[in-house]
Amino acid sequence: MYISKQPDQNSLGVVLTALAMAMGVSLVLGAWNGVLVAVIGIQPIIATLILMVAGRGLAQLVTEGQIITINSEPYRAIGLGHALTLPLAIFIALAAALLVAAFTRRTALGMIVESVGGNSEASRLAGIRSGRVVFLVYVVSAACAAVAGFMMTANVSSADGNAAGLWVELDAILAVVIGGTSLAGGRFFLSGTIIGALIIQTLTTTVYAMNISPQTSLLFKAVVVIAVCLIQAPAFRARFRRRRRGTPPPVAIADKPKEQVPA
Amino acid sequence: MTDSRPVLTMTGISKSFPGVRALHDVNFRLFPGEVHALMGENGAGKSTLIKVLTGVYDTDAGTITLADEPVSFTGPMQATAAGVSTVFQEVNLCTNLSVAENIFIGREPRRLGAVRWAEVRRRARALLARLDLDLDVSAPLGSYSLAIQQMVAIARAIDIQARVLILDEPTSSLDAGEVAQLFRIMRQLRDEGIAILFVTHFLDQVYEIADRITVLRNGGLVGEYLTAELPQLSLVEKMIGKELDVLEGIEEHARRDLAALEEGTPLVAVSNFSRAGAVEPFSLTIHSGEVVGLAGLLGSGRTEVARLLFGADRTDGGQVAIDGTASSLRTPAQAIDHGVGFCSENRRAEGIVADLSVRENMILAMQAARGWLRPIPRRRQDELVDKYIKALNIRPADPEAPVRNLSGGNQQKVLLARWLITEPRLLILDEPTRGIDIGAKTEIQKLVAQLSDGGMAVLFISAELEEVLRLSHKVAVMRDRQMVAQLANDDSLDADRIMQTIASGSHREEADR
Amino acid sequence: MTTGSLTAPRTRFRLPRRQIPVLATLALLLVMYGIGVSQYTAFSNVQVIFNVFIDNGFLLVVAVGMTFVILTGGIDLSVGSVVAMTAMVSAALLQNGMPAALVLVIALLIGPTLGLLMGCAIHFFEIQPFIVTLAGMFFARGMCTFISGASIPITDGFWTSMSQERIGNPAGNFVSISVLIAFAVVAVAAYTLAYTRLGRNVYAIGGNPQSALLMGLPVGRTRIAVYTISGLCSAIGGILLSFYTLSGAPLIAVGMELDVIAAVVIGGTVLTGGAGYVFGTVLGVLVLGVIQTLITFDGSLNSWWTKIVIGGLLFAFILLQRLIGIRYK
Ligand SMILES: Nc1ncnc2c1ncn2[C@@H]1O[C@H](COP(=O)(O)OP(=O)(O)OP(=O)(O)O)[C@@H](O)[C@H]1O
Ligand SMILES: [Mg+2]
């Protein structure tokens, strides 16, 4: 996420080493989160919150509170380069998505992650070493964050230990949840997540492009998010259909959606 | 009794789920002061009928009247308020709350809006005493075994001032003693004029308590009969739609020569396994091809023994040798590596992963053993899954259906399949036939017999002594968390002798080792 | 078949005795305070503790509301923005010359109303709480900037007197009125959770929502109620904040939701719901407050070292808390 590139050379080698080092640091940090959650058993939100606070501090420590400008051409290409007339960033994002998709769906990892998320005790008794799975998940998440960090810093050609990636975690979670994955765990939908991310980014860009004043942009965002989710929510659609069929729900409470109860 | 008017009638009830017609034009009536058994195979629609009645599900068609008033409940809250008290299939309580609270939540005695905790506990103790249970009512419910949780759920239901009491498989993990207690109370309530709807797969229980029987098959109504006029065989016929092949053959299986089996090094030999507060030190050997039954009362430590053998809980001490070499069984993953499988009694909390499909649930253990890097090829998965869906008659036979949508008994079959697929060398089955209909039960018993003939060792736990006797070569008896005896299953062994052993707990001289 | 009375054994899962996490937290908090005292002499002044309460009174109130939500297994991300919105609205209305009493009423109504709406969306449309409350957060924050892009000072007499009133002993130690209000909220919440049906239903839903439904508990009503309660607590928190800062600023309390959630969870409440106490939340807020105080006492740290040290202290604290918890299981 935070890359301090003192040797601002244009040589590819330097860039690659820098990337590798940054990636290495991210993996270590991801492993740290993984250990806290999987081995020590700290609630994930707290475990990762520690790094969220301290990590930013570390980033600032590395940059000494300055915003570091990056002049390396190959590095900037990550954010600004083009290939086949399309921005390179698209390919990177696509590659990341495909890689994760292959990683989860071509192997059994996806199912095992879903199983641990759905019922961790049952998974343990089925012989899944859930600790390892949880650990791995945090490392993967850190790796993806690192790639995102490359893209973000390359795009603006600088690394700001203080502001880079502020509140990205919320946007990222939102994208996942809009994509239909439950925060409680269980089934996940990568394609949904991609769509979710696109929706959020479209939203942000639209807010800029339409020149909506910053005052109302948040309101706008709130409305769109709710609208998207309402359209998705089966309970809402069911109700809407019932209304159109012209059978008004009998009593106000009778309208209550029936919860799914396993037999 | 029968000439009075029914307190509850359901007419023309239909209910479909996406892709499944769970109920089709079903009629049902319930008279005051009767025990009415609702019978049918797994997935016949019994639980769905109950959920439609109590408003958990909407109906697609049909009407329900309660005491001549048409009703349409929006949920159990309303149903309870109208005098319909229900124990749903599976334990539906909150394990994080205390026993007393689970019984009274929603209708706690209060003064000025404040819950009177002392009163809650006092009444909970009194109520449990009626069921002959002596529990620490302020302990969290989760610290008790599934069977006790089931009793607590029953206690909750019978304390509600109700006209109609619905019990969906309340006896599935109870022992004979608890069932007797429950029946005593059911009779008492029946005599007070309460209408009781009772679901079970145990035929003898039906003939012991029920006045009337309604049979469902494949979501349709087969008919309503007086128990006295319906012989057991024709009941079975009506439930499964054909005649049942009897259990011959299995009996002989169990009575084979134990000595021959016990030659050579045991597959698993544990000595002095124990866990504080769960089981006293015990030793047990299991040979390939041997079925060891575990008998004992509720809370005697049967499940605890199984969990230790599987590494689900850590032992405090003791050694284990597998194939004669010292090993360890500290985690489930380790146990599975040694070829041990364990089918838990608590399928909802420890068994199924409700979000996943039938296929995924079935291959889960096998996949876990292979590691995530070596996925099972899809073709192989489909083969295995199809095979067991057929073998165990899982319905609906759709491998991609989410397991949460299956009926209770069918979920149990999926779990069983999960372990059979791994082809373990020792399979620990904790109440494997819990909630399973008679047809499938025979299938499972045959399968166990067949697998042990093929060399697999089985540790078989069941609250039904008959079942244990039918399958096991030797029976280990548990009492007060001690393994008090190991009896060879020869001609002299029968249910009565096991009960005596349990009662006296001093038959060590009969131990065969 | 005679089985006689069953002395039902407690089997498996010996749950840790329920108070242990809270006690461990308390002990660690005392240790941390002790370290503070040994490092800085001024730390032993009782006023230091009072100041922790004064500085974090609004956080405490909001965290109490969040405790309800988290106990049901939900989450409320809108709290920080609602706090800011309440402060903004009060400031703006007071600037327009509205009487203080009326402003109080209006300000206290906004939060619960938004909470009620969010609760309804969560319950009736089955949308995940995370999304709904995130939208609520955007909405409330948007309203703040909509009202004014800049900070609005409050000069109203009632507000200034509330802010300056010191309740103390002759030795010169004091607390502000806000602290008393916060304590009142804590007391009411603790009572509600322990002794009312609403409170018990909150625990039941957090334990197992499906079971709660089948047990005939008012799941929907309770769920809506907790978001309304959280909204109300945020509104009270917003008022307290405006007492404290005597202004309403559009960007105040940004990111506060994370502090609040952290406080609740550090206090031993489980994020998946069903277990936890208000008293734990008080301790959680104190932990954050004491860490903050330790940092200010040091005074030599620059901005990034501050963050690193906060993270480090938090880590040490949680690690110890967890290890003690395991020991006593
Ligand atoms: N929520 C649901 N969604 C989809 N299908 C369902 C759902 N609930 C039940 N079914 C289907 O409806 C049918 C009837 O199920 P039900 O639970 O009523 O069976 P049952 O008679 O109670 O069986 P068991 O003896 O196993 O408990 C089954 O085929 C089941 O798969
Ligand atoms: Mg059923």
Image: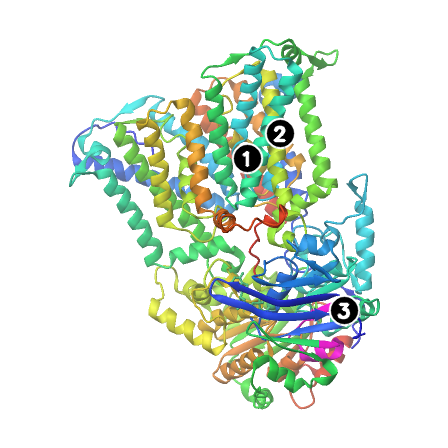
Q: Residue at horizontal 62%, vertical 30%? A: C232
Which residue bears the numbered disc 2?
Answer: C233
Q: Eyeballing the image, is C106 above or below C311?
A: above
Mark 1 element type: helix
Quadrant for residue B91, please give it.
Answer: bottom right
**Residue C277 visible here:** yes
Quadrant for residue A55, please give it.
Answer: top left
Quote the CA–CA distance across marks 2 and 3: 47 Å
Question: Quarter of the image containing the N terminus of chain B?
Answer: bottom right
**Residue B507 visible here:** no
The answer to whether C200 appears left or right of A114 in the picture is right
Chain letter behind tag 1? C
The answer to whether B158 appears left or right of A161 in the picture is right
Q: Eyeballing the image, is B172 above or below A202?
A: below
Q: Amino acid at mark 3?
A: Leu
Q: Nearer the viewer, mark 1 or mark 3?
A: 3
Q: Nearer the viewer, residue C186 or B355?
A: B355
Q: Amino acid at mark 2?
A: Cys
Q: What segment carries the magenta color?
A: B195-212
Looking at the rendered structure, whether the residues under marks 1 and 3 are on a common chain is answered as no
Q: Amino acid at mark 1?
A: Ile
Question: Quarter of the image containing the C terminus of chain B?
Answer: bottom right
Quote the CA–CA distance across marks 1 and 3: 46 Å
Looking at the rendered structure, whether the residues under marks 2 and 1 are on a common chain is answered as yes
Residue B182, disc:
3
Which residue bears the numbered disc 1?
Answer: C261
Q: Residue at horizontal 59%, vertical 68%? A: B306
Give the number of marks: 3
